[in-house]
Image (cartoon, rainbow, N blue to C red):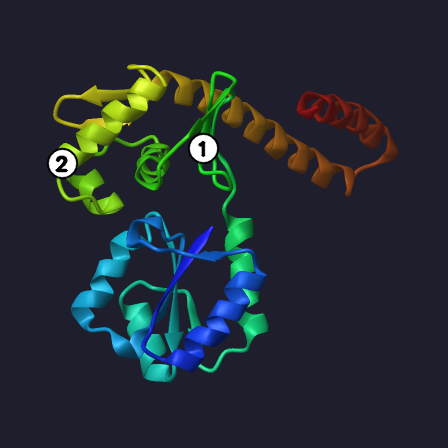
Amino acid sequence: MKYKVASDNKKLKERAFLSFNSSGFKEAKHIQEVDFWLVDLKNISQQTLSTYKNKQNYSFVLFLVNSQEEIEHCLENGFTNYLNEDFKTTELKAWCKYYKKSQGNVHISKEEILDFNSRSLLFQSSSINLTLQEFNLLKTLSSGEFFTTKELADIISVESTTSVRTLINRIRSKTDKKFIIQKRGFGYRLNSKKREENSEVNSYLDDLEEEKKILQSIVDSSSIFIVTFIHKKLYCINESFR
């Protein structure tokens, strides 16, 4: 995982360096490689601030603030992650730990998984290495919604819609042509059939979990005869989760 500190404060950058490196992060050499942005709010204009809204789609953005007004400024622009400018290294390390925990793998299907740690795609039992732009494109499309090439270009910060199509073709060459589908007038998304199969499984598990909660609430307030019957029912439900 790679980080970038956007600040002119040398001492602040030194403290950040210690926190990030002791948390297993490496400093990014190029903007396209950044997973975690640490941004000194007082150094940027309103126009520059707005550019971080798109970055939030594929990177984690943490702002450094020094007053209540700056906190309000963050919130007004939709940014909820902030840290006081005179932070201790332990505080930034806690944010690094939080970020790592929040980066769970994306299960596209039973056999297709986006791995955040290795930035790779498990596809039909094979591990496929992805560039950062390829990974961010798949991460966006994994929501199951259609995206136009213009929307994708804005989200993953590439120069043009042509670049988006090049990325899509490159991913298809590593997987198969049906992995990313296109619908005229809507755009691109990942194969819907696979996602619908997953949705059915998840829906079934959600129903079982809801039934389990309801039955447990009945157990807590029922006679021993009813409880005996419901315990058997709960046993069957628990077996379904295994």
Disc 2 residue crowd, few under 14, some 14–19, many 20+, Cα 10 Å: some
The answer to whether any part of residue 191 appears in the image is no
Kindly identify which residue carries mark 1. Answer: 120
- State whether residue 184 is above or below residue 147: above
Q: Earlier in the sequence, mark 1 or mark 2?
A: 1
x and y percent of residue 192 in the render?
34, 20
Can you tell which of label 1 and label 2 is closer to the viewer? Answer: 1
**140 left or right of 88?**
left
For the residue labelled by badge 1, is the local secondary structure a helix, a strand or a loop?
A: strand
**23 left or right of 56?**
right
Specify the quadrant of the image occupied by residue 211.
top right
For the residue labelled by badge 2, is the local secondary structure a helix, a strand or a loop?
A: helix
x and y percent of residue 141 in the render?
32, 33
- State whether residue 74 is above or below residue 164: below
Q: Are marks 1 and 2 in contact (CB under 8 Å)?
A: no
Kindly identify which residue carries mark 2. Answer: 161
Q: Nearer the viewer, residue 23 or 189?
A: 23
Q: Residue at x 31, y 75 (%)?
A: 41
Q: Nearer the viewer, residue 190 or 199?
A: 190
Q: Amino acid at mark 2?
A: Thr
